Every structure is written in C-alpha cells, then in structure tokens.
Amino acid sequence: MATTTSAPLLTLAGIRKEFPGVVALAGVNFELLPGEVHALVGENGAGKSTMIKIISGLYRPDAGEMAVGGEVAEFRSPADSIARRIKVVYQELDLVPDMSVAENVFLGGYPKTPRGLVDWAALNSRTESLLAELGLDIDPGTPVGELRVAEQQLVEIARALSQQAQIVIMDEPTSALSPGEVDRLFAVIEQLQQRGVGIIYVSHKLDEIFRIADRVTVFRDGQLVTTTPIAETSIQQLVTWMVGRELSDLYPKSPAVIGEPLLRVSNVSGPGIYDLSLTVHAGEVVGIFGLMGAGINSVGRVIFGASPRTAGQVTLAGQEVGAGSPGDAMEKGLALLTENRKEDGLVLPLSVKNNMTLASLRKFATFGWLWPRQEIKESADYVNRLSIKTPSLRQQVRFLSGGNQQKVLMARWMMRDPKVLLLTEPTRGIDVGSKAEIYRLIDEMAHRGLGILFMSTEIPEILGIADRILVMREGRIVAAFGRNEATQERLVAAAASDLNDAIVEAG
Amino acid sequence: MSAEISTPARSVGASGQSSLQDFLRRLFGSQEGVLFLIVAVLWLYLMSRSDVFFTQRNIGVMLSQVSMIAITGFGMTMLMIAREVDLSVGSMQAFAGVTAMQALNESHSLIVGLLAALAVGAIVGAINAGATLGLKISSFIVTLAMMQIVRGLAYTSTNAAVQNEHKLASFKKVFNGAFIENPVRIPNPVLTMVIIFIIFGLILSRTTFGRSIYAIGGNPEAAALSGIPVNRIKAICFIITGMLAALSAFMLIARMNSGQNNAGFGFELQVIGSVLLGGASLAGGKGTLVGTLLAAVLLGTVNNGIVLLGYNSNWQTAVVGLMILTAVFLDTMRRRMTGQS
Ligand SMILES: Nc1ncnc2c1ncn2[C@@H]1O[C@H](COP(=O)(O)OP(=O)(O)OP(=O)(O)O)[C@@H](O)[C@H]1O
Ligand SMILES: [Mg+2]
C-alpha cells in the first residue's frame, strides 16, 4: 500500500496535448506515489495512451509541466525518460526477437569484462537472478521470439528492474494473457510495489483494477474526471464517471428466434484446430470459449480461408465454401474479424472511411467506378452508430485510439451485410460503454437473422450474449452448453480439465 | 469534479472544415504543396535569370523531356504504392525503342510500330510480375536482373542503332516534341502525358482498382482478408508500368529519329527518384500522380536551368541522386513528426 506521506515520484501539472482536430489531453494534473499502483481508466480515445506517451518522452506536451522526483522534467525523446528511470511496457512489446532473454534484459547496458568485452557469464547469471527475484524460471539463453506473450511481458519487466526503474507504466498489459498469467503478472507487480516502484496501470478490465490498484484516475474526453482511492469507489461508479451517464445493461439480450442452419462446419482441421464440427443457425449467437492458446483464434481463420484447411467441409446456406479462399468465403456471405487488428486488419496509412469500406468496395461501385458520396454517407453513418471518435472520415486510421480502431474494423464487416459473422475477440481493448454497444449490435444483427460465431477468452461476455456455448481446449471442442446450463464454473472446468473428464461432462 | 466536460470530436460530419486556413495548412503540409511551391519559385528565378527560359519553345522542349519520365513514373507510382518496384524501365527505353523502329521499318505502319513497343512492355512487365509473385522473389532483385537481360536484348538486336528507314510522315509528327497543329498548341508528348495523367489519376483515386492498390501497399494481409486479389492487382501494375515505359520509349525514338541500344541509361533512377520525391514511400501505401508529375517537372526544370545558366551539364546526373536523398530524408522526417516508428 502506498504511504501517503512520501513525496510523489511523478507529478503532471496542467498537461495539454492537441492533435489536428482533437484535444487529446486538456490540462491534466496527476500524481504518482512511490509503491502505489495507480490505475488509469477511460473510454477509448479518452487520452490515456497519450498521457503515457508524454511521460515516456514520445510526445511533447503543448502546455503544462512534468516533474520526476521533484525535479522538472522536459523529455525530448524516450531516452530522456529512460534516463530518469521510467520504464514503459507497451502493448506492442519492443523486444528483439532473435536475441536471448539475457541480451534483451540488459539491452544497451551489457556488463563488461575488464578488457571491454561483453561479460557473458555475468550477463546470464545476473539475468537469472533477476528472473528468480520475479519468481520466473525462464532460461536466460532462450531467444525471446520463442517465448509466449506473457513471458515476453515479464522479460520487459525484468528489463525494467535491470534499468532500476522507479516508475513502471503498463498500457493494457493483460489483454493477451490467460488468467494464470495474469496472476503471475500481479504477483510481480506486488513485488515491484514493495521495492517502492510506482506503477501506472492502464486497463479496460475494471475487475482487475479492483484487485491490483491503490488509486484510480478516470479520464473522459481528454479531461481528468477524478482521482480516488480504489477502496472508496465501485465498478458501477467508475463506469458512470467514464461514460458520463449510467450504463444500465451491459448485455442486452433479446430472446433468440432460431431459424434455418446457415453455417455448417464438418470435421474441419487446420493449423491449431482438429476435427471441428459445428452449426450456426440464422438468428443464433454461438460462442466458443477457450483459454489463451486453446485455438479459438484459429477457428475463424480456418473457416474463412485465411489459414489453410487440411480436412473437412464448410457450407454456408447450403453452398460449399472453398478452402483457403477469403474471396470465396466473402462471396458466399461470411465475414471475419480477426483478433489481430494491427497485423491483418487495419490499413494504417488509409483513412477511416477507406478502411471501413475496404471489404465492400463493390457495393459502392459500378464497373469498378466508385461513388464517393455513397461511401461517405454510409461511413459517416457507422461512425455515428458505433460512436467512433475521429476528427473526420479522412483521418488516417493510424491516429485513432486502439478501441476506436477496433470499431472501424467492426464497421468494415457489418457494412458487408454478411449472412454469418465470425468474430474473434471483438471487444479486446474496448471500453465498457462501447462493449455494451457492440453486444447490442450483435444482438440486433442476430435478431435480423444473421448467424454469429463469437470466439472469446472472456467468460462474462460469452455467458452474456451467446445462445449456445462451445468450449475449446487444445484445438478441439470439448464441451457444449445451452444458454441456461452454462455457468462460469462449468466453462472454466471444461476449458482447463483433462480432455477425458471434459468429454464426460459434455456428454 | 466531473462538471463541464466538453466533448471534442464526438461525431463527424460528411466532410472536414474548409476554411482558407485549413486549405493553406493542407497545401503546405503536403508533399505536393511543397513541390508546387519549389517549382514556382524556381520558375520565377529562371525567368529572372534567363530570357530564353520562359519561351514557348524552351518550356515545350523541357516538358517534352519531362513527359517521358512522368509517363513511366505514373506506372511506377502505382507499382510503388503497392510496395513493388521496376528497375527495368531504363533498359526498356532501349529495347522497346529498337524493336519498335525495326517494326516500323518492316511494316511502314505507325500503329504496328506502336503496338510492337507496347507488346514488348507488356511482356517484360508480365515476366517481372510472374517472377516476383510466382516465385516470391523481391521485385527489386527480379527487375534488377531484368534490367540487365533487357539491355542485353537491346544490344543483341542491333549493333548501335536502328535508323529510320520508313520515312513515315506521321511518325515525325506524332511524338517528336515539336509544336504540332493541335488546337491547344501543346507539344504532343506533353498532351499525351496530360491525358495519361488524367486517366490513371482517375483510376487511382476513383476506382476499386486504385483503392485496392493503396490497401495492398498499406497492409497486404488486411487487403487479402478483405477479399482483394492481391497478386492479380500487383501483376496488372507491373504490366501497366512496362507498357507505359514502352510508350516513353516510342516517344524517345520519335524524338531521336532512331532506336538506340544504349538509350535510357539511368532513366530508371530518374523515374524512381521522381516518384519518391513526389511523396511515395519505399514502404508502400502512399503516393500520388500529382506528386510524381510535380517532381518530374522539378527535375526537368533543374536540368534545364543547369544548361541555360551555363553550368557543366554533368551536374544533371548528380541532381538525380540528390533528389532521391531529399525524398528519403523528407519521408523520414515526416514519419518522425507524426510519431510513427
Ligand atoms: N498521433 C496522433 N495524431 C492525431 N490524433 C491522435 C494521435 N494520437 C492520439 N490521437 C487522438 O487523441 C485521442 C486520445 O487518444 P489515446 O490513444 O490517448 O486514447 P486512449 O485513452 O489510449 O484510448 P484506448 O482506450 O482506445 O487506447 C484520440 O481521439 C486519438 O484519436
Ligand atoms: Mg490506448
């Protein structure tokens, strides 16, 4: 717990940052104490990442002052902030994949022998002891590229220790972690706390914040709404502050009207999935739950043809869908939102509008000639419906906040009016208000007779919106539940238990 | 504490603001705007320094030279937006030109000669596409090899040059750069350049094909998952570039009145330099024809100025290198400023 008497590690006073058409931060005052975990929450585009980038020296504020350890700090580049012992663990990790864990941990400051060569023995042993302090047993010689994301993140934290960081900042660190890995991360965070390190923790997962944070600061539209000790608030209260109104129902779910079978997947195998069979009916939301690494990310890709299908058959409304051909899948009425928005979703240099209409170009064209007015009209419509925060439709999508980028991709696929929508982790990195909005859209689409296959690692949303839930483990479906039989406990048990036990349970 | 919170940028109208200020910021904030300014300043300077510069004849001759770089550059722009490149366009000036002149001499038909050039361009473009996309080799390597192969073909088809033996009157008229009795009194090469600029400009900005090119360059995986036939579109870009380079070659033989097997040395760098300075990036996803055109005009103006002001004309070679450096420098600066890695 933070000792309230100690002087702040970091102080921001009146920090302001504008981008063309957007006030990202409108005069923010903020304080970080030694040994505290200070959570930042706020809707997508509220300015959280911008504040972090200012602290880390990536952006320079337009106005305001920053002080580290009581001394005024004017950072010109990330090197300046590192020199003041600030470490940022970004969501896109900046490790060098081909180098070993040890080389990464001490990157830029290797221990030297008296003759000026790298002291490999010291490098490895010091890394080993750092990792041991964090309770990790990773071989310092492993190339970082071979580690899981969670482990890479912990290596980043070890690097923070090697740089003797006083301030550690984490931007949405748990969005790609399994529950076990989250526990381990939290244990490490507590250790850092005990050393007096101050931690800024950005997340959309409010339950996590109540587990780990001492204080929480809420942003809305570039303004700091309030800072409060976590013990004096509640999830409900935070949501109200973030959204600016009370959020009544997170999972709007109307009774499903199940129609004809639309998508039939029979005995399909591909990279990461084995012998997958399932049916999605018109008007139905089928959820697939699995832990991180269980293969749920491959389901959509193989069905859609983004990854090769080595066996089995896929039909949509009776028509066979060719293997390995996204074009054919789209033609037949499938749409796929992948879990990886930067890698295979967004076209960063293109505008918001052009990203949205990318999969529906033919709809806006006659013989290949585009009619911009229709494109603009429909894109503007989606910007408003999904409340996407952007100064204009012409804004490059690269400049949108993470959550708003995700909404742009949702719009891309909704625009196509598909028959069946395959959604992989569609709410990753999205704020509560927009989550509710996306669940409402899913419900509405199902109501209009679309079939929806919804892959997620988050139990509450699966329970909240799915009519039927399949559980995946090691690439296979191991259990199936109706909406009324599914509970958190049963899903967890099925996802984690032995294959045999789970099949018995499912049977 | 939470009172009076404004909501900036909540919703969006159909288009952005269009105040004069906004217009000026866009003009100077864009590569095209800056190039336009530089060209304008340079023209004013040369007008003040030389009586010859702003004569119809000089501007016409200068722009006729520019037109070959620009026309090939329009294809190259499309290719580079799609993250590919074609280094064989210089050798194409020789080979397509020699072949076209031979065909003209055989057939005594302008159309047959032109078609021969275009066919050579299309075939070389198709081979570039096939090797790059089919064998998954970088187009830089493939077209570097093609650059040598095509040059070799030009050398083997004639000892030095194929002379004009057909004496077609129409041939001299069509692309030779003189002032022809067309109603606008613009040299035909320049007119051709303008027409091609308009056609491909519209294709890039107003068609699904053009949009797809930008998407492919910006993120090929995302484009493929959005149903865009990535390889087909890239292949078409290679073929278009080959054909436009061949058209330039045809314009060149019309001007020289012969097809020379050593024509077009360094031409590929002039073209790629113009495309880069015009705002395209080796990383793909961006670039415009306006930028390429302005950069080509800038290059032509500088070359013209070097001659008019009496400097050693060998500086013209160095200018191209300077241009490429400047382009890459500007690209890097812009990325830093907008906070991209
Ligand atoms: N480089 C930039 N250029 C232009 N606008 C930007 C830039 N970076 C951020 N913005 C804008 O500033 C606002 C704040 O963005 P920021 O990334 O800080 O939000 P965030 O709170 O981190 O949201 P999320 O939860 O979605 O990650 C957004 O409206 C965003 O579009
Ligand atoms: Mg963010």
Image (spheres, rainbow, N blue to C red):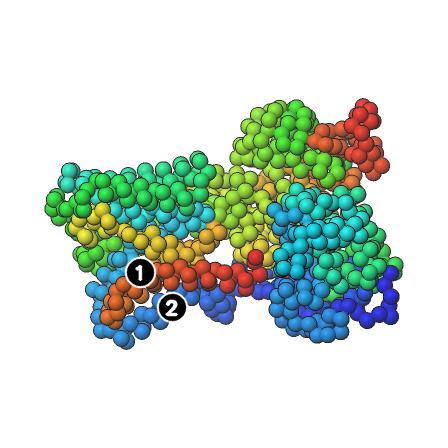
> Residue at point 55% right, 49% down?
A347
Residue that label 2 marks: B38
Q: Amino acid at mark 1?
A: Thr
Q: Is residue B230 visible?
A: yes
Kind of element beneath mark 1: helix
Disc 1 residue: CB within 8 Å of ligand 1: no
Given residues B119 and B209, the one toward you in this image is: B119
Q: Amino acid at mark 2?
A: Ile
Q: Earlier in the sequence, mark 1 or mark 2?
A: 2
User: Would residue A276 be found to the left or right of residue A371 on screen?
Assistant: right
Q: Chain of mark 2?
A: B
> Residue at point 52% right, 40% down?
B224
Mark 2, Cα crowd under 10 Å, few <14 / some 14-19 / many 20+, is some
Given residues A493 and B170, the one toward you in this image is: A493
Whole-percent x, y for residue B3 in the image: 76, 67
Residue that label 1 marks: B317
* Mark closer to the observer (1, 2): 1
Q: Quadrant of residue B313?
A: bottom left
Residue furthest out toward the bottom: B48
- Viewport quadrant of the C terminus of chain B: bottom right
Q: CA distance from mark 1 to mark 2?
A: 20 Å
Given residues A174 and B141, the one toward you in this image is: B141
Residue furthest out toward the front: A115
> Residue at point 25% right, 71% down?
B309
Q: Is residue A19 above or below residue A358?
A: below
